[in-house]
Image (cartoon, grey):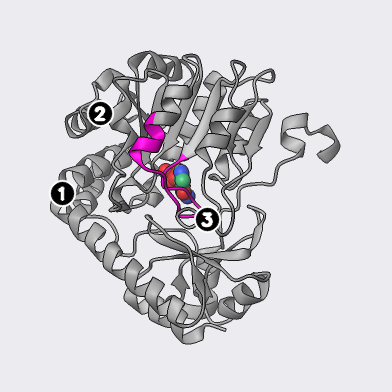
Amino acid sequence: AAALANRATSALRAYDPGHDLPALRRRFGAVIAELGSNENPLGPSPRARAAAASALDEVWRYPDPLGASLKRALSAAEGVPVSGITLGNGSHELLMLLAQCFADAEHPVVHSQFGFAVFPIAAAAAGAPSLAVPALPADHPEAPYGHDLDALASAVTANTRLVYLANPNNPTGTWFGDAALETFLGKMPADTIVVVDEAYHEYVDASGLSTAVRFLDRFPNLVVTRTFSKAYALAGLRIGYMLSHPSVAAVCERLRESFNVNGVALAAAEAALGDRDYLARVRETNRVDRAWLADALSARGFRVLPSQTNFLLLDLGRDAAAFEAHLFERGVIVRPMVGYRLPHTVRVSVGSRAELDRLLEHLP
Ligand code: PMP
């Protein structure tokens, strides 16, 4: 089969989805610290749980293929018309869908070297080559390994149909401000779709960074993707959304699977979106615990990179495999960034205090 793979897929590694959690629970019991997947340790809002439970009564029906009720709520929350909203089976699906709609073999998809792993996979799935633009250097004071927007802008030509940015980015945790994005968008050809993946948007508290959504009116080629997997803690239900010009949404609507988002997810997401107090608690807990964890790790001599997300990237300066294996044997799961060709770094989620205590206790 490897010999049969087409040019786009043969150069790719599969997306690394992490460990088999049920198997690990059987081995270590409930006490494992799962710090490898950037999940929200507080879990979803009680209102989202209740909405999901009552939606179970309706699972024998197909879900609303338009997700109309959730879209109305998102429209009110984000100030984007319903016609500019597309729902996805996780934002991962939307990233794939965008490439299917806008990429092809003749037009390389542009992304940053250490940008989110799905970007080149989405390009390959669409049969398009991808161009990984060198990241900012390891010793960059604000965004080590982050997106180099100037280099990205220079790599875009009239032949570029699709650019993927992540802000903040996974796995680096780095971000760029609104002003830098505005400058970048101003340099883009009108026919180049620029996707800003804001999966970690709700965790952001840096000054100068709000959201790309504020530029949607001025740049009809801009697309913003978001997810309910992170701050809203609905990763298991698989639901994300995309905000764009209605004409972009209309194109995606042609290829979207009709029932891509299930009814339990639609109901839970709408309830989660409505619980602003719970979201504020999630944000505050993450802000405090992220700073606490960064301090604790720095105090032990680790290089902790700046982060606006619910995870930290540690630069060990040496291969992370032994570090990971040591923690794994003690029921602490972290993620070495081998697949990103950053094998000397490891990503650690801001888990619960109990999980973080366990991490600190067992650090090699
Ligand atoms: N974008 C980024 C930057 C991510 O880190 C993730 C999840 N790891 C996703 C998108 C996809 O998330 P989901 O499909 O759960 O919405």
What is the magenta segment's predominant secondary structure?
A: loop
Q: Quadrant of the N terminus?
A: top right
Q: Amino acid at mark 2?
A: Lys
Question: Image quadrant of residue 228?
Answer: top left
Mark 3 or mark 1, earlier in chain: 3
Q: CA distance from mark 3 to mark 2?
A: 40 Å
Q: Quadrant of the C terminus?
A: bottom right
Mark 2 or mark 1, earlier in chain: 2
Q: Amino acid at mark 3?
A: His
| Callout 2–callout 1 Cβ contact below 8 Å | no
Q: Which residues are magenta?
A: 166-182
Q: CA distance from mark 3 to mark 1?
A: 35 Å
Q: Residue tagged by mark 2?
A: 71
Q: Residue tagged by mark 3?
A: 140
Q: Position of residue 136 (x, y in %)?
A: 56, 48
Vertical position of residue 338 compared to residue 86: above or below: below
Mark 3 or mark 2, earlier in chain: 2
Left or right, 278 with reference to 163: left
| Residue farthest right in this picture | 3
Vertical position of residue 191 compared to residue 258: above or below: above
Q: CA distance from mark 2 to mark 1?
A: 17 Å
Q: Residues within 10 Å of mark 3 (few under 14, many from 20)?
A: few
Question: Image quadrant of residue 285?
Answer: bottom left
SS under mark 2: helix
Residue in the picture at 16% in, 30% down? 76
| Residue farthest left in this picture | 277
Residue in the picture at 61% in, 76% down? 323
Q: Position of residue 60 (x, y in %)?
A: 33, 35
Q: Residue tagged by mark 1?
A: 276
| Callout 3–callout 1 Cβ contact below 8 Å | no
Residue in the picture at 77% in, 37% down? 10
